[in-house]
Image (spheres, helix red, strand yellow):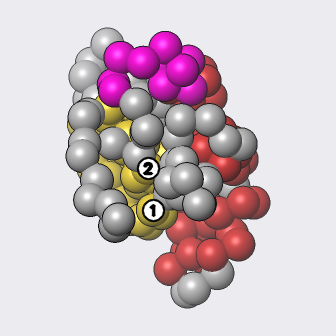
Amino acid sequence: MVRIHVPVRAETLAAMLTGDAAAADGDPVLAVMLAVIREGGVLGDFGLYTGVVEIAPGWESFRSGPDAAPTLGSAGEASLSSTVILTTYAVCGPDDPALLAMVGRLLAAHPWEVPVIEVSPTRLAWRG
């Protein structure tokens, strides 16, 4: 499983919460993350379906340390970030070079000083 915490513009989150799913593709950071997943490869590949990803809108709270250079808020202060959590799956193990390359692209595009991208082994139940 790969879970990516993606900061989004407040207006993107507001639109998504009213049911405007297309707003995700208009957000500059979220659109890049979704493009990496949707392009094919090991992320979101279910055989008959590709680019499979769960999109969960919400907020994250954090307090950056005094030496941090946060992209939102000020060092040492609590902040709330409009965030979308993307959850997808990989058809390989967490150490597979193809997966690591895709995660590297996600990390490179992520604006946070400390991106939150979780990679863990998962076993999916399949029919047949």
- Element type at marker 2? strand
Quarter holding the C terminus?
Answer: bottom left
Residue positioned 54% across, 35% down in the render: 42
Looking at the rendered structure, the kind of residue marked 2 is Thr
Please state which of residues 109 and 113 is positioned toward the viewer in this rendering.
109
Mark positioned earlier in the residue sequence (2 or 1)? 1
Residue reaching furthest to the right: 26
Quadrant in which residue 3 is drawn: top left
Looking at the image, residue 104 sits to the left or right of residue 119; the answer is right
Residue indicated by mark 2: 88
Task: Determine whether label 2 and label 1 are within 8 Å by CB.
Answer: yes
Residue indicated by mark 1: 54
Q: Position of residue 31 (x, y in %)?
A: 69, 50
Looking at the rendered structure, the kind of residue marked 1 is Glu
Looking at the image, residue 45 sits to the left or right of residue 66; the answer is right
From where the camera sits, is residue 75 visible?
Answer: no
What stretch of residues is rendered in magenta? 93-102
- 109 lies above or below 95: below
Q: Position of residue 15 (x, y in %)?
A: 61, 77
State how far apart marks 2 and 1 are (Cα): 6 Å
Residue reaching furthest to the bottom: 18
Residue positioned 25% across, 22% down in the render: 65
Q: Position of residue 109 (x, y in %)?
A: 62, 28
